[in-house]
Image (spheres, grey):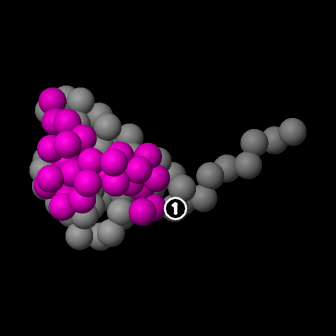
Amino acid sequence: MPKIPKSDEKVRLALLSGTIRKRMDALGVTDKQMALCVGVAEGTFIQKKNNPERFKYTEVAKVAQKLKFTDEEKLEIL
């Protein structure tokens, strides 16, 4: 059976989640630090990281700034 391709939105959400994880690991930033930056509880941040469609635009902007997303990474998730 052929594999059904992911929608553009699902691809962007997967890229957002992966980029957050990659940059957090590279910069040594914890979930707790990110939660403080975004202004949510640590558990809430973890849920949003796992389900990035739950992020608000303003939260994504804070995450991108804290984790120093490149311009290319920013364009991938738009």
User: Which quarter of the image is occupied by the N terminus?
Assistant: top right
Compared to 49, does 74 lie above or below? below
**Res. 37 image quadrant:** bottom left
Magenta extent: 28-54
Compared to 69, does 38 lie above or below? below
Compared to 38, does 14 lie above or below? above
- State the image coordinates of residue 72 (x, y, percent, origin top left): 26, 51
Report the residue at 30% width, 58% height from top: 75
Give the residue furthest to the bottom.
57
- Left or right, 41 with respect to 12, comes to left
**Res. 18 image quadrant:** top left
> Element type at marker 1?
helix
Report the residue at 45% width, 61% height from top: 53
Report the residue at 15% width, 30% height from top: 28
- State the image coordinates of residue 68 (x, y, percent, origin top left): 13, 47
- State the image coordinates of residue 46 (x, y, percent, origin top left): 35, 46
- Report if residue 36 lies within the magenta region: yes
Residue 72 can be seen, yes or no: no
Q: Amino acid at mark 1?
A: Glu
User: Which quarter of the image is occupied by the C terminus?
Assistant: bottom left
- Report if residue 35 lies within the magenta region: yes
Q: Main secondary structure of the magenta part?
A: helix
Classed neighbour count for the residue bearing mark 1: other residues with Cα under 10 Å, few (<14), some (14–19), many (≥20): few
**Res. 62 image quadrant:** bottom left
- Left or right, 28 with respect to 43, comes to left
Residue behind mark 1? 9
- State the image coordinates of residue 5 (x, y, percent, origin top left): 67, 50
Of 70 and 34, nearer the camera is 34
Of 47 and 68, nearer the camera is 47
Report the residue at 19% width, 48% height from top: 34
Residue 21 can be seen, yes or no: yes
